[in-house]
Amino acid sequence: MTTPHLSALIQPQVIAVFGASPRPDSVAGQVYRNLRAAGFHGQLYPVNPKRDTLDGLPCYPDLSALPQPAELVVIATPAATVPAIIRHCGEQGVPAAIVLSAGFSAQDPDGPELKAEMLAAARHAGIRLLGPNCLGLMRPSLGMNATFSLNQGHTGSLALISQSGAICTAILDWADTHGIGFSLMASIGEASDIGFAELLDFLVEDEETRSILLYIEGIREAAPFLHSLRKAARRKPVIVIKSGRFAEGSRAAMTHTGALVGADGVFDAALRRAGVVRATTIAQLFAAAQLLSGPHRVQGERIAIVTNAGGPGVMATDAIIERGLKLAELAPATLASLDGQLPGFWSHANPVDILGDAPPQRYAAAVSACLADPGVDGLLVMLTPQAMSAPTAAAQAVVEAARSSDKPVLSCWLGASQVAEARHVFEAAHLPTFPNPESAIDAFSFLAQYQRNQSLLAASPEAFTPTAVCAEGMAIVAAAQAESRHLLSAEETRALLALFDFPLLPMAVATSAEAAQQAAAAMGYPVVLKIRSPDITHKSDVDGIRLHLADADAVAEAYHAIQASARQHRPDARLAGVTVEKMYNGHHGRELLLGVSQDPVFGHVISFGAGGVSVEVTRDQALTLPPLDRTLALQLISQTRISRLLPAYRNVPAAAVDTLVDALISVSRLVCAVPAIQEMDINPLLLDAEGAYALDARIIVSAGAAQDAPAH
């Protein structure tokens, strides 16, 4: 339900513009002129104590002089004046304000102090703010253009929320030439108060909005953002473009996972989990906007192509395959229909090449036949201008043929001057038109990916409930924290993993060669010896591992060699003997990595991929956010290249993927239960036909007391 304050921001009946002026370079003056030009449906009042009239209408010295109370105030005055204006708004009972003014950032003189003063005044009075340093807000259906953009947005069903005012103006200018309209355009600027989450909550219920575009530069609070994003994506397609990163700089990672996971990858994982799609360029965002602004939605991933030239058809086919879509296989009835209406030399397959001399009637026949095929989910129609082409008439024929279908039809008339009029035909009919086949396929792929991501959104892992096991896990971590240790010992790591039913091979600690021999004899040969030190994270870096030790002599020799090597490579390290572990004796084990890292915005991130000592080189990994269920775990596995080696091939039996899924869920439960975990590596995790076996694991915890786990 929309709050009164948000309703006053987006659907006001009375607007006051502070600083309105006739000067051409006046931002407030441009906002006032835009509101008048757009035909604002409510009452509009300019506020400027230096003027008596503006454009022949009364200009008011302050809000108390207005004929009626203002619901929304637009402020475009110097930053130093804004806090006092907000206090004045509070005295007059104004519920919402848009602050266009800049000068509140950390780089501005007195910026942080002015922002704090402005926000304190707003909170004291219960005023909700959009901005500062923003372009403003449009609600075209109300004739409301409270921005200083030179473009007047058309009324439509597409909503745009952006942290960048420049992106808004670019999209508005582009949309103006393509006849695309908006239900809402909001530039949130620094988002000091109202941000993405609340605007998304409004758009979920907004009957004017059918699709949503977001331009994001950074997220401060992950939980409300993800909650609102998921809620919106359940009802409407949401496409996001993001620039920048969450945190500046870099840090030395203590685990492979920490070295591999970047903020951008985490953001991708968060978007997939929320059921939305990410675009990577402004061109892709434009492409998505064209398709989203229309009435059709994608129900599948199979595309048919109609073209009058073979080359563009091949280019479109390549784009389809590269984006993970499918080239539709035409039904026999469709092929028969096309045979009866096209010349004998047509391609007899998809892409449907109707030849270079194709008249409009041939386009109409091919389009109608393809759209009638139940195996076609969408259609791309292309034209390359040739001597015998009639681009405009062909466009009109396509529009007529597409009118009776509920499947998306995308047009691509290649060229410039010869096809300009044809593109106007498509735009007038609100049929998406693109300058090249790649852009068209990009647009289709966004909606197809949105449909795929809905399965992730539908996954509902059980809510985490603290148990006695959680308390035991926290106690293990607390013991390390009491000693100011970040790196858990091998015994602590194993104990923590065992609490959550993670598969482990037998292990013992030995502080002498004789003790190592006794431990090996007790568990049975062959065994593995690994250096034990609170200061050595990666054992292979100090040549601190010996494998395939088959008898007592080999164990003793390995013990002394490991100690000597560790002292040589790390003379500063504290050595505490070795761990003796049962050697993995299975066959056809796949080396995997299962890891955890902490993102400063989204909290715990789980990673999975190829393991071994070369993980930073192969960089085959996928990311997700906890909690996990079986559906989400399987989806995570499927995103990696190593997943192709898990089924049976040649003489290698299929790996026990169910046990891998169990291991992923165990790690998910662990990080939800023990939020102090900062990084974790289980590498390698060997997976064969019998099950999963953790051969090495390390856990890094925070220095202080554990904090509550971030909500996902």
Image (cartoon, rainbow, N blue to C red):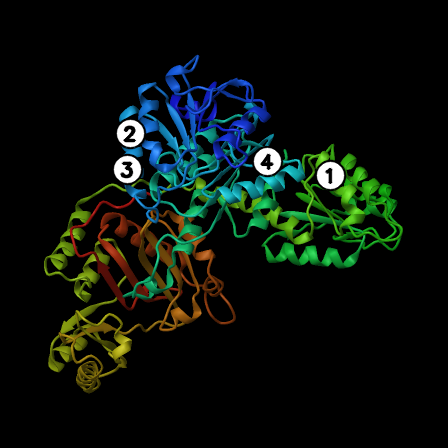
Residue 414 lies, with reference to residue 212, above or below; the image says below
> Quadrant location of the C terminus?
top left
Amino acid type at mark 2: Ala
Q: In terms of sequence position, does the residue under pointer 4 or pointer 1 come before the other?
A: 4
Q: Which residue is more in the foreground, 163 or 664?
A: 163
Tell me the residue that label 4 is attached to.
Answer: 151
Tell me the residue that label 3 is attached to.
Answer: 116
Who's the residue at 59% across and 45% down the image? Answer: 286
Amino acid type at mark 3: Ala
Q: In terms of sequence position, does the residue under pointer 1 or pointer 3 come before the other?
A: 3
Tell me the residue that label 2 is attached to.
Answer: 121
Numbered disc in front, either 2 or 1? 2
Amino acid type at mark 1: Phe
Element marked by disc 1: helix
Name the spot of residue 119 as percent of width and height, x first. Answer: 30, 33
Element marked by disc 2: helix
Residue 135 lies, with reference to residue 304, above or below; the image says above
- Hey, which quadrant is residue 174 in on the image? top right
Horizontally, is 50 left or right of 193 in the view?
right
